Image (tube, helix red, strand yellow):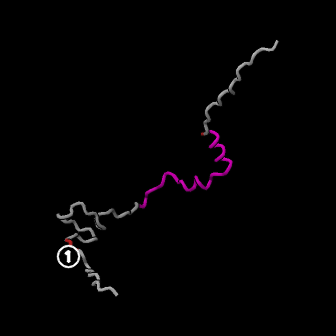
């Protein structure tokens, strides 16, 4: 067994480090602190309507529609001409 002392853990470190609480109360010592209270509420209005539905678009895609879209978007560079062989000596 080693004779090392057990680590000392403080249950609440805010009193020692003088950090603001994680709930987000503003402190002049840490003005950029973003806590739970500083974040938005995340409420969507009742009359909000979505203009698009990407999931529906994905579900409506088929193999054929994807292949058509791929053929339209695919642009290949022109194939280079076959290299011409040099003409050999003429036989008489």
Q: Where does the image place residue 41, in percent across and percent down from the top left?
A: 34, 64
Dot 1 lies on which element? Answer: helix
* Residue in the foreground of this view, choosing between 85 and 61: 85
Q: Is residue 38 above or below residue 10?
A: above
* Residue in the foreground of this view, choosing between 81 and 28: 81
Instruction: Please state, as top left, top right, bottom left or bottom right, where the C terminus lies in the image.
Output: top right
- The picture quadrant where one finds residue 72 is top right
Residue 56 lies in magenta, yes or no? Answer: yes
Instruction: Please state, as top left, top right, bottom left or bottom right, where the N terminus lies in the image.
Output: bottom left
Q: Is residue 79 left or right of residue 43?
A: right
Q: Where does the image place residue 56, in percent across and percent down from the top left?
A: 57, 55
Q: Where does the image place residue 74, in percent across and percent down from the top left?
A: 61, 39
- The picture quadrant where one finds residue 84 is top right
Q: Is residue 62 above or below residue 25?
A: above
* Residue in the foreground of this view, choosing between 5 and 40: 5
Residue at point 17%, 63% (across, down):
28
Q: Is residue 25 left or right of residue 44?
A: left
Q: Is residue 19 above or below residue 85?
A: below
Q: Where does the image place residue 43, in percent across and percent down from the top left?
A: 38, 63
Packing grade of label 1 (10 A; few <14, some 14-19, many >=20) is few
Q: Which residue does the numbered mark 1 point to in the structure image?
A: 15
Hey, which residue is sitting farthest top in the picture?
92
Magenta highlight range? 45-72
């Amino acid at each position: 067994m080693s004779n090392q002392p057990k680590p000392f853990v403080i249950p609440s470190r805010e009193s020692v480090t003088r950090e603001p609480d994680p709930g987000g109360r503003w402190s002049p010592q840490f003005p950029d602190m973003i806590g739970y209270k500083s974040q938005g509420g995340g409420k969507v209005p009742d009359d909000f309507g979505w203009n698009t539905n990407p999931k529906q678009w994905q579900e409506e895609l088929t193999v054929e529609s994807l292949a058509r879209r791929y053929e339209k978007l695919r642009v290949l560079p022109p194939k280079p001409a076959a290299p011409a062989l040099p003409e050999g000596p003429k036989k008489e």
